[in-house]
Each structure stands twice: as structure tokens, then as C-alpha cells.
Amino acid sequence: MAQRSELETHSQGLEVRKQELDNLSATLQGWREQLQERASKLAVAEAELEEDRKSFNKRESHAANMEKQLGRQRDSLKKQKEWADKRKAELEERSREVEAAKAALDTRVQEAVQE
């Protein structure tokens, strides 16, 4: 009878241990699921971050190309302005020469009329 009581006690102890192991197993399974969920969310976040990085690199490249293009346009406009300023000065000089020639011609005409 003592042996039977000892076996029952041992059996009950094993049953308690089994229940503890089952509880731990359930806890571990819950943690595993949480880790998998977090890993999945992390993978999505990493993919989004990579897309953002690619998009940023494209925008940065586009901005650098625009900057170069604007620099070329600025240089071209500067040369055009310099050419226009030079041409304006030439036309102003030519206009003064024409005015001087006209004044000289008017003077001759006046002199010729007076004679």
C-alpha cells in the first residue's frame, strides 16, 4: 500500500510537471508567433525603407541633373546677354553715327538753300 501511495504521489508529480510543460509549451508557441509577426512586420518595414531609399536616390539624381541643366542654361543666358549687350552698344554707336551724318547733311542742305 505504501508503494501504491508512493506511485500515486509520483504520478501526481509527473502530471503536475506535464501540465507545467504544456503551459510552457503554449507560452513558447505564443512567443514564437509574436516573433514571427514582428519579423514579418520588420520585413515589410525594411522593404518600405528600401523603396524609400531608391525613391530618394532617384530624386537626388534628378535634382543633380536639373542643377547641371540649370547651370548650362544660366551660362547660355549669360552669353546671350553679353552678346545682346555688345550688339546694343554697336547699334547705339551706329545710331550716333547716323544722327551725326544726318546733322551734317541737314547743315549742308541749309547751306545749299542759303546760297
Image (cartoon, rainbow, N blue to C red):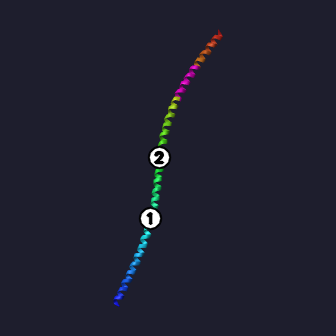
Instruction: Pick whichever of labels 2 and 1 is earlier in the sequence.
Output: 1
| Image height of 85 relative to 14, above or below | above
* Residue 36, image quadrant: bottom left
- Residue 95 part of the magenta segment: yes
Looking at the image, residue 18 sits to the left or right of residue 80; the answer is left
The amino acid beneath tag 2 is: Glu
The range drawn in magenta is 84-98
Quadrant housing the C terminus: top right
Q: Nearer the viewer, residue 44 or 69?
A: 44
Under circle 2, the secondary element is helix
Q: Nearer the viewer, residue 12 or 51?
A: 12
Residue 9's x, y, as percent?
37, 85
Looking at the image, which residue is at 40% across and 80% down?
A: 16
Residue 75's x, y, as percent?
49, 35
Q: Main secondary structure of the magenta part?
A: helix
The amino acid beneath tag 1 is: Gln
What distance separates the C-alpha of mark 2 from that of mark 1? 35 Å
Looking at the image, which residue is at 40% across and 81% down?
A: 15
- Residue 83 part of the magenta segment: no
Under circle 1, the secondary element is helix
Residue at far top of view: 115
Q: Nearer the viewer, mark 2 or mark 1?
A: 1
The residue wearing badge 1 is 36
**Mark sitting on residue 60:** 2
Quadrant housing the N terminus: bottom left
Looking at the image, which residue is at 47% across and 40% down?
A: 68
Looking at the image, which residue is at 60% across and 17% down?
A: 103
| Image height of 90 relative to 36, above or below | above
* Residue 112, image quadrant: top right
Residue 104's x, y, as percent?
59, 15
